[in-house]
């Protein structure tokens, strides 16, 4: 069967055949007679060594001996160097990467532990959604208005006033936790700030070099071995635990301000609401940053709260840093200056 080819392909085949014929004629003219035929080669004389064998007959000059190393070219050497450098880079450990993976693993382990401490997560998430709705409808606008109306210096002064107002409760818990040094400093700060500091709006105690320390009844219970109990999300009040919720109730009951102003009076409720607003304003920036940097705000808030309270419990038992370093969500000494 005849196969028709394209004109260009037929021309190419014809040129190839012509070139092959010309190359064969030139090769026949250049080689000696009989080189293209298999003629026997003369044998070397008896007793002659390898040197007596002609190079043309032995082929030693045409190819290296079997197993002989092939000399490397510059291109091969560069390729080997590049491969060695790549293997060295892959084998080298990155301590910064290890540190990041270590921190991520620690955070993952703590989040898993926090989830185990939240057996009522479904209920708590419902309360969390309710609190978020109250924040959006009521508390956020009030907080923004307070920030717009009162300059930053004034807001810090009001915050210091409420912290000074809570000092008797802090002092009582430090005595119960057997911390004489902290209790003496708290008493000295209270006297100095209440008198020279205009009821706490100023902070001459800090100027005198007396550090502020914190304590609550939840810490006191932890000091004597009470477990934290399950994690709870309280309506309006936010994250807590069974131990800390009980501690908050006791702190309110033993607060002298409650008895001086009278319990369940409208001015007492206004004062408590004002303190809650001031504390929320002091911590709202940190809460917004926590929400912006988290995928699940509920889980991130739960982990942050439990870490803070665990650190406070260790401090109460004398196992950690002073509690004013880990106060809840931004109420650090730097925010009070």
Image (cartoon, helix red, strand yellow):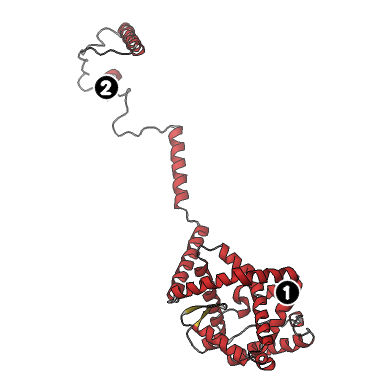
Evaluate whether residue 13 shows in this view. yes
The residue sitting at 56% across, 65% down in the picture is: 291
Is residue 98 or residue 42 the one in the foreground?
98
Is residue 336 or residue 259 the one in the foreground?
259
User: Where is residue 100 drawn, in percent x and y?
Assistant: 51, 61
Q: Of label 2 and label 1, which has the lower sequence position?
A: 2
Determine which residue is flagged by label 2: 58
The residue sitting at 70% across, 75% down in the picture is: 336
Measured in 3D between alpha carbons, the distance from the residue under mark 2 to the one under mark 1, in whole angstroms, is: 103 Å
User: Where is residue 202 drawn, in percent x and y?
Assistant: 77, 80
Evaluate whether residue 337 shows in this view. no
Is residue 217 or residue 91 the one in the foreground?
217
Rendered image quadrant of residue 316: bottom right
Viewer-side label of 2, 1? 1
Determine which residue is flagged by label 1: 155
Vertical relation: 48 (above or below) 186: above
């Amino acid at each position: 069967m005849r196969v028709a080819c394209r004109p260009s392909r037929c021309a190419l085949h014809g040129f190839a055949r012509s070139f092959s014929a010309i190359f064969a004629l030139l090769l026949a003219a250049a080689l000696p007679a009989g080189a293209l035929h298999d003629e026997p080669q003369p044998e070397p004389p008896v007793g002659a060594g390898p040197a007596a064998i002609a190079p043309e007959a032995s082929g030693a000059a045409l190819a290296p001996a079997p197993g002989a190393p092939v000399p490397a070219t510059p291109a091969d050497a560069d390729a080997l160097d590049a491969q060695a450098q790549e293997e060295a880079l892959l084998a080298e450990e990155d301590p910064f990467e290890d540190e990041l993976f270590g921190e991520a693993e620690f955070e993952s382990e703590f989040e898993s532990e926090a989830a185990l401490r939240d057996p009522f997560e479904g209920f708590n998430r419902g309360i969390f959604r309710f609190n978020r709705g109250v924040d959006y409808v009521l508390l956020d606008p009030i907080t923004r208005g307070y920030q717009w109306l009162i300059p930053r210096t004034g807001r810090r002064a009001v915050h210091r006033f409420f912290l000074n107002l809570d000092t008797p409760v802090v002092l009582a818990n430090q005595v119960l936790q057997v911390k004489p040094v902290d209790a003496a400093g708290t008493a000295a700060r209270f006297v100095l700030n209440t008198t020279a500091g205009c009821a706490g709006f100023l902070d001459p105690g800090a100027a005198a070099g007396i550090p502020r320390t914190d304590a609550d009844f939840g810490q006191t219970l932890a000091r004597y071995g009470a477990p934290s109990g399950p994690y709870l999300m309280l309506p309006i009040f936010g994250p807590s635990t069974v131990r800390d919720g009980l501690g908050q109730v006791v702190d309110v009951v033993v607060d002298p301000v409650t008895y001086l102003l009278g319990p369940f009076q409208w001015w007492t409720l206004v004062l408590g609401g004002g303190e809650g607003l001031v504390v929320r304003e002091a911590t709202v920036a940190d809460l917004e940053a926590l929400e912006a940097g988290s995928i699940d705000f509920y889980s991130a808030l739960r982990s942050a709260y439990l870490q803070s309270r665990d650190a406070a419990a260790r401090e109460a038992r004398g196992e950690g840093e002073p509690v004013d370093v880990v106060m809840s969500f931004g109420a650090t000494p730097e925010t009070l200056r």
